[in-house]
Image (spheres, helix red, strand yellow):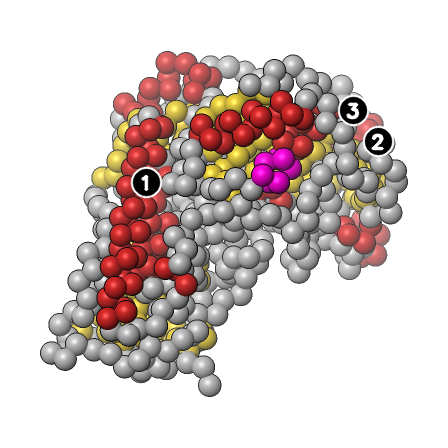
């Protein structure tokens, strides 16, 4: 019988991946891990494909027990991670023996922790992805007692001088500050806000509790649209900064509806979106203006760091004769997925 | 660059191509044909295209491609297509039962007042013409159509609802929509259909495509239960001609 991972303390945890690709045209948002960088690194540390299913643990305590020996990696927000009561490092692969309890408690400074398992586990998919879609009601949070079927078992493995960390892979760890700086570039409708557009950078904004993976609502001195008129619904990018009404900014995140009718003042950068996926309600954000070149350079540097990590993981796993996934063939890049049915008119 | 399209940066991972100087119908055809063309090219790094009424959002991974590359291909395809790409597939027509007003369409009186019409006139206009699906949008693959021939645009609600029921039939500006799943929404609600809009076990989960038409048919509240086992796919006519 295949080994399983049993959830003991659920908190708020979902099965995630990097999101639903190629379905925006059908009106389905990407969704997927709110902090794509941390999620990607967790899978890479387990030798998995970047897009393999993993756990996204939000804010609350979590515990699980495998029925066989496994190797895990825990990334994302700082937390207290233990295996059978012994503190284990984040951002490194960690062996777990059959029956040992893995606990993630005290998540702080950031909001979300990612837990990947070597070989990953079975997950229900919708349109090619296991990412939850709360509007469709797909991918509900896990409950205590739920069992995930593991795809591979890892050979028993531990350091001969037990409890000294087995790996030193030096994964790229992003900062988790108490006050966040989020990079944005100009949006396509920047001109519609006239001089008030600068307010985005003048003072900090506070993240309100009415924030989630669909969008973050921020309080502060908001820019004002100076033009009037009806806007036809059109596609809006993840990261779009909008000013719907009232005294709140809306920043669209990965669960955003693919169309909207509000002008887009600015767009959060790819690296900024991963950081934004970690901001807790009540924390403050300062926006920083970047050029497209600066934003792209930062994103590519982050990806190159992951590619270099992938090579180190491969070398380490080969030396330890750990069989691992197909991630090392591809480099985790996105390619066009032709839609199953061609939409024409 | 093609004379009919402007291309604008939209953050570090997207571009927007907008049809310009064209009427609504050719503008819509152009952005959808452009989306098809871009899919056919299978450009590395481009992962999503969102053609709507007169605009096309192209999303890509800026680690593996860049704005200049995507922009060049878009401009090339726009020039190749010209201003009047032909429609290619047969259209389907969906006749959709709707209970108007009351708890089903709580904004019907307000919309009637804003447009200076009676509730009956609003219903007659909304259900009196075939409305063309222009795109699939938010939330959850909602069919977004042209608006009914109202005398003027319908304003959005001053305060959006935190929850709109599945099947709600709404209008805003010069657009109309059916809301497939419960979700927040700022569009005035005229009525609700008992028919299920999506089928999560199909791929795609939507039976309708841009270019199909919807015709709304008023029913009485007591007829609601006759339709609750149906999905939109069950209501599709066979092809009713090309283009």
Q: Which residue is mark 1?
A: A300
Q: Residue at x 86, y 44 (%)?
A: B239
Q: Are marks 2 and 1 on the same chain?
A: no
Q: Chain of mark 3?
A: B
Query: Marks 2 and 3: CB-CB under 8 Å?
Result: yes
Query: Marks 1 and 3: CB-CB under 8 Å?
Result: no
Q: Is residue A220 left or right of residue B71?
A: left
The mark that comes first in sequence, 2 or 3, is 2
Q: Residue at x 88, y 40 (%)?
A: B240
Q: Which residue is mark 3?
A: B149
Q: Chain of mark 1?
A: A
Q: Residues within 10 Å of mark 1 (few under 14, many from 20)?
A: some
Instruction: Kindly give the residue lying farthest to the left in the view shown.
Output: A161
Q: Which mark is residue B129?
A: 2
Query: Marks 2 and 1: CB-CB under 8 Å?
Result: no
Q: Position of residue B55 (x, y in %)?
A: 60, 27
Magenta segment, which residues?
B35-41
């Amino acid at each position: 019988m295949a080994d399983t991972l049993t959830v003991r303390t659920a908190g708020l945890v979902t099965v995630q991946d990097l999101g639903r690709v190629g379905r925006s045209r059908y009106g389905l948002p990407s969704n997927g891990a709110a902090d794509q960088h941390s999620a990607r690194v967790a899978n890479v540390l387990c030798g998995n494909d970047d897009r393999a299913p993993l756990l996204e643990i939000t804010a609350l305590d979590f515990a699980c027990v495998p029925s066989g020996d496994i190797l895990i990696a825990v990334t994302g927000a700082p937390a207290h991670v233990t295996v059978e009561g012994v503190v284990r490092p984040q951002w490194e692969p960690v062996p777990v023996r059959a029956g040992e309890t893995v606990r993630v408690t005290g998540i702080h400074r950031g909001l979300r922790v990612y837990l990947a398992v070597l070989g990953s586990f079975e997950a229900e998919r919708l349109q090619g992805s296991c990412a939850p879609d709360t509007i469709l009601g797909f991918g509900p949070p896990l409950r205590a007692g739920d069992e995930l079927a593991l795809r591979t078992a890892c050979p028993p493995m531990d350091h001969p001088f037990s409890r000294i960390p087995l790996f030193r892979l030096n994964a790229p760890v992003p900062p988790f500050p108490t006050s966040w700086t989020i990079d944005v570039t100009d949006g396509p409708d920047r001109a519609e806000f006239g001089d008030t557009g600068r307010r985005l950078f003048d003072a900090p904004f506070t993240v309100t509790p009415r924030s989630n993976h669909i969008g973050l609502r921020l309080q502060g001195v908001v820019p004002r649209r100076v033009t009037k008129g009806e806007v036809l619904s059109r596609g809006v990018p993840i990261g779009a900064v909008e000013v719907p009404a009232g005294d709140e900014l809306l920043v669209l995140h990965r669960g955003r509806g693919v169309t909207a009718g509000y002008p887009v003042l600015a767009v959060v950068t790819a690296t900024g979106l991963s950081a934004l996926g970690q901001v807790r309600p009540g924390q403050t954000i300062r926006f920083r203006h970047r050029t497209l070149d600066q934003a792209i350079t930062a994103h590519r540097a982050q990806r190159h760091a992951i590619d270099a990590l992938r090579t180190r993981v491969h070398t380490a796993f080969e030396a330890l004769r750990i069989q691992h996934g197909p991630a090392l063939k591809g480099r985790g890049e996105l390619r066009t997925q032709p839609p199953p049915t061609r939409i024409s008119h | 660059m093609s004379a009919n399209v402007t291309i604008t940066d939209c953050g570090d991972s997207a571009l927007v191509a907008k049809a310009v100087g064209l009427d609504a119908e050719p503008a819509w055809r152009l952005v959808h044909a452009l989306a098809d063309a871009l899919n056919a090219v299978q450009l590395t790094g481009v992962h999503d295209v969102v053609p709507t009424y007169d605009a096309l959002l192209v999303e890509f991974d800026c680690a593996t491609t860049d704005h200049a590359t995507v922009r060049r291909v878009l401009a090339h395809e726009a020039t190749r297509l010209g201003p009047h790409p032909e429609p290619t597939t047969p259209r389907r027509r969906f006749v959709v039962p709707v209970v108007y007003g009351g708890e089903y369409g709580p904004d019907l009186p307000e919309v009637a007042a804003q447009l200076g019409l009676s509730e009956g006139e609003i219903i007659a206009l909304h259900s009196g013409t075939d409305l063309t699906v222009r795109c699939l949008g938010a939330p959850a693959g909602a069919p977004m159509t042209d608006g009914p021939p109202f005398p003027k645009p319908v304003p959005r609600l001053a305060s959006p609802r935190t929850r709109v029921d599945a099947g709600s039939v709404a209008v805003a500006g010069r657009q109309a929509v059916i809301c497939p799943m419960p979700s927040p929404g700022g569009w005035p609600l005229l009525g609700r259909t008992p028919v299920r809009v999506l089928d999560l076990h199909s791929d795609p989960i939507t039976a309708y495509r841009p270019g199909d038409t919807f015709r709304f048919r008023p029913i009485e509240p007591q007829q609601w239960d006759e339709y609750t086992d149906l999905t939109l796919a069950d209501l599709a006519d066979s092809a009713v001609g090309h283009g």
